[in-house]
Image (cartoon, grey):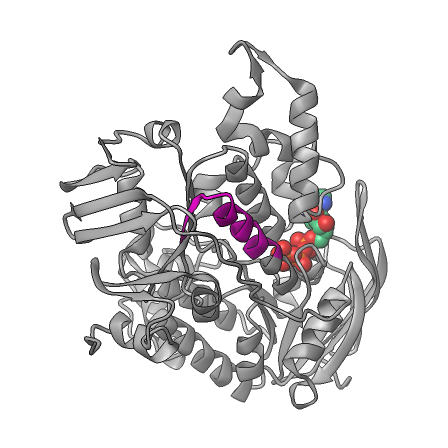
Amino acid sequence: MSEYVIELKNVTKRFPGVVALRDMKIQVKPGEIHGLIGENGAGKSTLIKVMTGVHQADEGEIYIDGQKVSFANPKESSEAGVACVYQELNIDRLMNVTDNVFMNKWIKGSSGLLDYAEMDRRTKEVLTEIGQDLDPNEITGKLGMGQQQMIEIAKAILIDSKVIIMDEPSSSLGEKEVEQLFKVCRRLKEQGIAIIYVSHKLEELFELCDCVTVMRDGEYIWTKPIEEVTNDSLVSAMVGRSLDNQFPKEFGERGRCALKIENLSQVGRVDDVSFEAYEGEILGFSGLVGAGRTETMLALFGSDPIDGGKVYVYDEEVNFKSPREAIEKGLALLTEDRKGQGLVLGQSVKSNLILSSLREFTEGGLFLQEDKIEKTCHENVDALKIKTPTIEETTAKLSGGNQQKVVIGKWLNTDADIYIFDEPTRGIDVGAKVEVYNIMNNLVKQGKCVIMVSSEMPEILGMSDRVVVMREGRITATIERDSKHFNQESIMQAAWGGSLDD
Ligand SMILES: Nc1ncnc2c1ncn2[C@@H]1O[C@H](COP(=O)(O)OP(=O)(O)OP(=O)(O)O)[C@@H](O)[C@H]1O
Ligand SMILES: [Mg+2]
């Protein structure tokens, strides 16, 4: 028996124009929570896909309990005890919990018919094991993201996995759900199951992991027990240099009121919301996940119909029936759900970058100016450090974080006056976050108005000039940067519904 439940040696994986993994290695012990970290495009997801048989390495070996194996497909890896909870969950939202848990491995009774009673019983049992009180007959589409993820974990446990890999599992979960996820991870650890945990949130690694492996540009940098790691040593190993300032806040000059919202309502989602946003400032929107921030932005942008309220852009009352109308009036909205609303994954990086601003690239409204398009796209790729072999690459082939950067580039090209960024740095590595903050700095210095919805407190405190706090569809506080309440405690207090003294 080997000391390691899974081990990869000398793994190299090439894609056309890219070496995604180069002589990479990782060693994971049973019952270990092993963090895996690296910049966007470093090769984390590719390494995982090699472990799960989605991709086959060009060179190198995989060992399970010391036995050399090779996986032609995900079925073979799951039979060997390796399961993965991907960020895009493999859940059929129309089917119920049991159907999803037992998908493709139905239990049949002696009559040859499917034994639903037994499958429901086993589903309930394994969900209870991970502390989930869920009805096996509930339709999964009705459950929250966190619960859907728990179903994926239940699936992994049912097939007796020895290794469960989680690729950025916390990126769309609220605080409570993340806590729940951590609890489940610790329970799995107690049962001797190894977990490989990928995240861009460094504080999560410190809280959860026993050790961490850093990779950069497809290569192995080091593996260390978490006690021997500091925030700075992680960052410099990842980025290859030290970052002196994670929040390089610069100040613009507050100008005219660019956007004014009065009593905006959308039944059940947005409740009587009023605020003003000015030129030359970053207006942060804080609150717990589900507080109605995204809904507010979608409503004012014309994505979702409103039930009441008024929107003014530079003192002119507007009534957007569609996002197109909002864009024409100088608004840009970077959505939090990049896969659903921000990108056409089957199209090239170039097409996506110019998607929202085609008019700026046409001559007389008719002919596309290819030279201008090429130049702009190359500028975007440089400014945002988008890792792609060429601008013609299909966007789906970029790493998750690099896709996010394409969405940002797309909106920068629209030359808007009011930029709404919803969770702009989700899934983006620490180095690239700084690039995004610098872009926001430039926008406010040009006198643009920036609204930043973020669930990351350091980002809200680091970059906002003012913060609006929401809870259950309502605004509970608006805090200026120079106020005594401009701190984590006060903002959290308002987010939980408490009132702040003057
Ligand atoms: N199917 C594919 N075809 C071509 N290139 C690919 C494919 N999958 C990944 N790549 C490339 O391999 C490199 C590593 O990507 P990978 O998705 O593994 O990065 P990552 O570390 O998971 O990044 P992120 O933090 O952004 O998710 C990237 O340059 C990416 O563009
Ligand atoms: Mg990835």
Q: Nearer the viewer, residue 175 or 435?
A: 435
Task: Pick the residue in front: 303 or 325.
Answer: 325
Q: Position of residue 348 (x, y in %)?
A: 63, 32
Q: Where is the C terminus found, in terms of image quarters?
A: bottom left
Does 451 lie within the magenta span?
Answer: yes
User: In which quarter of the view is residue 351 placed?
Assistant: top right
Q: Is residue 118 visible?
A: yes
Vertical relation: 79 (above or below) 441: below
Identity of the residue drawn at 58% across and 78% down: 205
Q: Nearer the viewer, residue 322 or 123?
A: 322
Question: In the image, is 27 to the left or to the right of 449?
Answer: right
The residue under the point 39% across, 46% down is: 279
Q: Name the dominant secondary structure of the magenta segment.
A: helix
The x, y position of residue 110, in whole percent, is 39, 63
Residue occupying image coordinates x 61% and y 85%: 31
Is any atom of residue 94 visible in this view? no
Residue 19 drawn in magenta: no
Q: As drawn, is 76 to the left or to the right of 102?
A: right
Instruction: Give the residues drawn in magenta, as a range.
Output: 435-452
212 horizontally vs 272: left or right: right
Rendering quarter of residue 494: bottom left
